[in-house]
Image: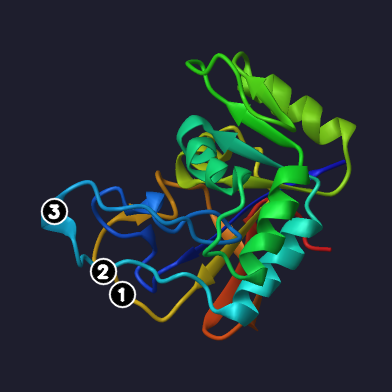
Amino acid sequence: MARLVFGMMQSLDGYVAGVGGAIDRFVADAAGVASAPESDDLVGAPDLPPPGPELGRYFNDRARGMAGSLYGRRMYHVMRYWDEDRPEWDEIEHNFAAVWRGQPKWVVSQTLKSVGPNATLVSDDVEAFVRRLKSEIDGEIDVAGPTLAATLTDLGLIDEYHLYFRPFVLGGGKPYFASPCRPLRHVSTSLMGEDAVKLVLVPAEVPLI
């Protein structure tokens, strides 16, 4: 049976991206995606920098071991940045793109009519689909983005939360937890890459092993 894992980099004050739609700049539990802020007033606003080489390789290895990823419409659109190679990419980015393209993807949306390669559109009864998906495959399924994670948390479907804290304070933006969450229990803390501290949390009602 698969486990759903929601993991993202975030600031010390709990934001996965800064203000002004900045999640479109550096997003996903594995890498950063570049795009410009939506407003000139937000140019220079604080945001998370992309991961360093060591942290980037860690996220690549983690993505390589995933059974697949669940996306909402907006996050899937952002992640399609990795569909085509770009000349400015380094080796780590090329490696991540190759992993992402080959990975099964399930996209939750009631407005999309189609999705790209290795992707399945989920438009009806998300809870039933995800429960069936968990029962049919093994391994870890990544949950991409706070909004979808909040929906799946409310349904009691997320098994683990991986919080990658980095030494930056944004003061506002897109929070890791998009809505109140049931009580969680700490499982482990570890150092990752150049500057990240990883916290693993599970729902408090999950029995200790």
Q: Nearer the viewer, residue 61 or 85?
A: 85
Furthest toward the left, the residue is 41
Kind of element beneath mark 3: helix
* Amino acid type, callout 1: Val
Residue 149 at x, y = what percent?
A: 54, 42
The residue pinned by badge 3 equals: 40
- The residue to which callout 2 is attached is 46
Q: Which mark is in front, 3 or 1? A: 3
Callouts 2 and 1 close, C-beta under 8 Å: yes
Q: Are marks 3 and 2 in contact (CB under 8 Å)?
A: no
Compared to residue 30, the image places residue 194 above or below, namely: below
Assess disc 1: are there few (<14), some (14-19) or many (≥20) residues with their C-alpha within 10 Å of its C-alpha: some
Q: What amino acid is labelled 2 in the image?
A: Pro
- Image-based side of 1 in relation to 80, left or right: right
Image x and y of residue 166, in percent: 46, 76
What is the C-alpha distance between the residues marked 2 and 1?
8 Å
Task: Identify the residue position indicated by label 1 in the image.
Answer: 169
Q: Position of residue 1 (x, y in %)?
A: 87, 41
Tag 2, which secondary structure?
A: loop
Crowd tier of the residue under label 2, counting other residues whose Cα lies within 10 Å: few below 14, some 14–19, many 20 or above:
some
Judge by depth and name the residue closer to the eye, 143 or 21.
21
